[in-house]
Amino acid sequence: VVHAEIVLPEAAPDWARDRQQLWNKAEAADTRKNSTLAREFEAGLPWELSDVHRVELARAITRALVERYGFAADFAVHAPSHRRGDDPRNHHVHILCSTRVLGSEGFGEKTRVLDAAKTGSDEIRWVREMVARLCNDALARAGIDASVDHRSLVDQRIAALADGDDEQAAVLDRPPTQHRGPVVEAIIRAGRESEVDERITEELADEIEAIGKRQVAEAALRADIDALDTGIGALKLQLAVVEFQVAQALQEIADATPPAPDPAAGPFGPGGV
């Protein structure tokens, strides 16, 4: 643990700054034995940043959560352990949050917006976007030419295809990495075989095969779309020709039709007798 800190809403009481009192009162606020007392957010922190900048980033992420949901948050920044053989890039933050809003009178209502079926997915999407934005802001301030993207590889690839960037879409057409865990990672780094790693390798091979099949299907679909586009273009041209011919025929009819007599003019022309 590199750093641990409590972040609170502005109206929070002073006792909430004490970690023991904070979580004891959070537990006391719920009387059901199966109550959920806290929720956790975990976010990766760019390894390119310094420890100081990573702590600042973790604080900014936590502050954004507190300002949006009004709960109390207790965050801890973790660094990779060389002794355990962790990936040296595995800097991350754990943010433990109360499930209840914290006000001047103590804990209040539950933050249901994060759990409700109608709002939960949208809120999680907001959290992911916020974390990515703050990470990229921190990297930019540090002058580091790197960025993160909260979207899945599939969503990124769809966006690249929509922008006409086929090269980037091809780069993104790959299976996502799978989290192995510290134990398996240590086994692999030690050069020993792992049944888990073998299973993961097999799963990745299956995914790569599925990607190949999808690429063939997409190529066929693109050919069909191109053929449809060509057919639609020909139909539009034919329609334009027909419209022109109809307009020309109507004009010819109008030119050949004598003007109708004016009923107000009388039998002797304008003015009568």
Image (cartoon, helix red, strand yellow):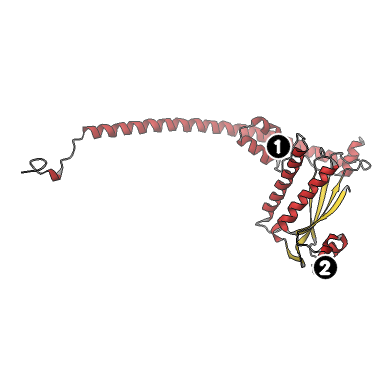
Near-viewer residue (144 or 95) = 144
* Residue 106, x across and y down, in percent: 78, 66
Amino acid residing under circle 2: Ala
Q: Which residue is mark 1?
A: 210
Q: Is residue 204 left or right of residue 193?
A: left
Element type at marker 2? helix
Q: What residue sits 28% from the left and 33% below the top? A: 251
* Residue 71, x across and y down, in percent: 76, 59
Near-viewer residue (190 or 2) = 2
* Residue 145, x across and y down, in percent: 75, 34
Q: CA distance from mark 2 to mark 1?
A: 51 Å
Q: Which residue is mark 2?
A: 28
* Residue 62, x across and y down, in percent: 77, 52
Amino acid residing under circle 1: Ala
* Number of residues whose C-alpha sits closer than 10 Å to that of mark 1, classed few (under 14), some (14–19) or many (20 or more): few
Of mark 2 and mark 1, the one earlier in the sequence is 2
Name the quadrant containing residue 85.
Answer: top right
Element type at marker 1? helix
Q: Is residue 193 visible?
A: no
Q: Is residue 211 left or right of residue 235?
A: right
